[in-house]
Amino acid sequence: MSLWEYANPVKFLGLSERVMPWLWGFAAACLGVGLIWGFFFTPDDFRQGSTVKIIYLHVPAAFMAIQAWFMMLVVSLIWIIRRHHVSALAAKAAAPVGVVMTLIALVTGAIWGQPMWGTWWAWDPRLTSFLILFLFYLGYIALWEAIEDPDTAADLTSILCLVGTVFAVLSRYAVNFWNQGLHQGASLSLDKEENVADVFYIPLLVCMAGFVLLFLALVFYRTGTEIRVRRTRALIAREGRGAAAQVEGA
Amino acid sequence: MIPDLGKYADAVLSAYAVSIALLVGIVALSLWRGRRVRAQMVEAEKRAGRNG
């Protein structure tokens, strides 16, 4: 069995019907456990006080904002190279979820920044690249809505996605490229020395798993919705052609 | 039951409130649109079946 079989809308819908209950269930469980654990059962940080509890929302949302764009990049490339409609629709379905993740990261970052840095916002490399990524998400959604022909919309949004990838990469590595600004380095790293303390780290990992699973559940569900929209439009167009043929034949 | 958040209570609680509202919002909006589209598709399929 090949992965490309799921480019068939019927097979994709069958797969999503099977996996979605698990995704919704595990997402709710991980988010519930992670957020309750982080909010109620972790201590304050010796420097940041109780604001450290914002980490359980800010870091997973920022992580997913970037990963969502990379997921859109992969499926956009599949559309450009192999012309599978499901991949283009998956990119379209993921964009609003990515917007919400980016918005959560920006808002919680501002709320966290105010007491810690003394300002809601600074034109810091990471913050600025994240804001530009947010604007790219909005532009991407607007472009889908602005173009009537779905294949042309998929072509143009795929190109926009390729361009926006520069800012997704910058959002992730800005603090490494430019050693300036207020934002600290990565909170999670493969280098254990750089990670946050274990007491915060484990509930943070659970929250990140919750955000990943919620993103997957939403993308599967929303892609199914886009497939159904496409089928409904095709049925209505066929109906219109049938009616026109009847009028011509009369 | 709410832990003592000290002087940062407003910041922490508003971060949680905004984030949870946004997450619930995207889930609710997705489910609402999904159900509406599914009903429209079933209707269009029925019409297509009737018209042959």
Image (spheres, grey):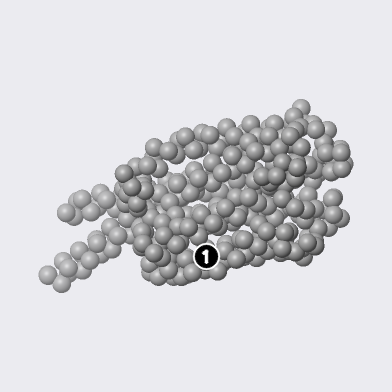
**Residue A224 locus on image (x, y percent):** 40, 49
Q: Badge 1 is on which residue?
A: A161
- Point 81% across, 58% down: residue: A182
Quarter of the image where one finds residue A18: top left
**Residue A82 locus on image (x, y percent):** 36, 62
- Relative to A241, is A161 on the left or the right? right
- Point 75% across, 42% down: residue: A193
- The C terminus of chain A, quarter of image: bottom left
Quarter of the image where one finds residue A99: bottom right
Disc 1 crowd rating (10 Å Cα; few below 14, some 14-19, many 20+) is: many
In the picture as drawn, the residue positioned furthest to the bottom comes out as A248
In the picture as drawn, the residue positioned furthest to the left comes out as A250
Q: Is residue A55 visible?
A: no
- The N terminus of chain A, quarter of image: top left
- Relative to A215, is A44 on the left or the right? right
Q: Secondary structure at mark 1?
A: helix
A60 vs A203: above or below: below
- Point 62% across, 41% down: residue: A208
**Residue A48 locus on image (x, y percent):** 84, 43
- Relative to A107, is A101 on the left or the right? left
Looking at the picture, tell me which residue is in the foreground, A108 or B41: A108
- Relative to B9, is A82 on the left or the right? left
Looking at the picture, tell me which residue is in the foreground, A217 or A226: A217
**Residue A120 locus on image (x, y percent):** 80, 57
- Point 61% across, 61% down: residue: A168
Q: Is residue A233 visible?
A: yes
A70 vs A19: above or below: below
Q: Amino acid at mark 1?
A: Cys
